[in-house]
Amino acid sequence: MIKQFFVPESISFAKLTDIAKVTFSAAIALNLWVSPSLAGDPFRNSTQHSIGDQTEAAFKAVFQQGDYSAAARYLKQALSSEPNEPLAYAMSASLAYGNKDWARLDAYSKKTLETGQKLVSSDPLRGNLYTAVGHFLEGGAIITREGTNGVPKAFGRLRQVYEYLDKAEAISPNDPELNLIKGYMDLLLAVNLPFANPDQAIERLEKNAAPQYLVDRGIALAYRDLKQYSQALDYADRALKTTSENPEIYYLKAQILQEKGKKENSKPLIQDAIANFDKALTKKSQLPSSLVKQIERERNQATNRLNNLG
């Protein structure tokens, strides 16, 4: 069933902006996890789906290593050699959002939708899935471009997102790729919109989604936004066990520790947060400059809070 959302416009803009920010960097491109034993389709042991090598390498660079510079190089090759892979365009849209390149964001969002639609005939599951992702991206682009004036159009896109997710789910309801992307979208909406319950989305991720690292990361993000910091910290630590080279996971852990420390007036927690901000910044050369500035700003806030605690 297609989900309907009835939310006041003033709330919608603020919250959908948050959704776009997180989704462009983490959720829209959750298509594969690189594994030597399952190269090309690490989600499925059977009925595997073909995914391009350059797109796969770009995903590994972003989500395993947090290396956006390398990802940009791989994506440039992917757009040339793998023009029918919608994930390549979705990830390119993600990078464009991070670079505040709104023209490229619009262009790659449209290409994600177009390639998803074309894929339906040969791969109905992924075709419908990425048609949904394309509509989601275009909705986020509308909010970014038009602000509050774009809210009605963005919610129209959201209805289309769930229409195509439902079509994909009808084909293979337990598919791990589908459940990862749908679980992320449901979580992001649930924690940012009033009267929504994230429990079902968390259950979807834990029960049917893969790979586990991205499941753990998504749930950590959700618990962070729900201000359930002990649970968030647990899932962030789980993610770090398998992606210890990714500076963004240290940044996520630092955010959680800082909020938990602020809530408990705890100097040790704030000190631990600063240490994790510093770990993230050791690899700032591979992160977008806007993200580096954000990490540095939050680290300074943590330092000021620590000094105020005496």
Image (cartoon, grey):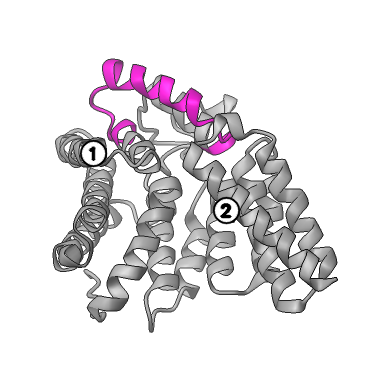
User: Magenta part of the protein: which range?
Assistant: 63-89
Which quadrant is the C terminus positioned in? Answer: bottom right
Is residue 233 among the parts visible in the rendering? no
Residues at marks 1 and 2, CA–CA distance in whole angstroms: 24 Å
Please name the residue that numbered disc 1 is placed on: 112
Q: Amino acid at mark 1?
A: Thr
Q: Residue visible at 15% across and 37% down?
A: 114
Classified by dominant secondary structure, the portion drawn in magenta counts as helix
Q: Is residue 248 left or right of residue 208?
A: right
Rendered location of residue 167, percent (x, y): 22, 55
Which quadrant is the N terminus positioned in? Answer: bottom left
Counting other residues with Cα less than 10 Å from the Cα at mark 2, is it few (<14), some (14-19), or many (20 or more)? many
Rendered location of residue 34, percent (x, y): 53, 31
Is residue 135 among the parts visible in the rendering? yes
* The one of 141 and 27 positioned closer to us in this rendering: 141
Rendered location of residue 105, percent (x, y): 26, 40
Q: Residue visible at 42% across and 50% down?
A: 27
Q: Residue visible at 51% across and 67% down?
A: 203
Hey, which quadrant is residue 244 in on the image?
top right
Please name the residue that numbered disc 2 is placed on: 217
Badge 2 marks a residue whose secondary structure is helix
Can you say whether 248 is above or below 193 in the image? above
Q: Amino acid at mark 2?
A: Arg
Hey, which quadrant is residue 231 in on the image?
bottom right
Badge 1 vs badge 2, beta-carbon distance below 8 Å: no
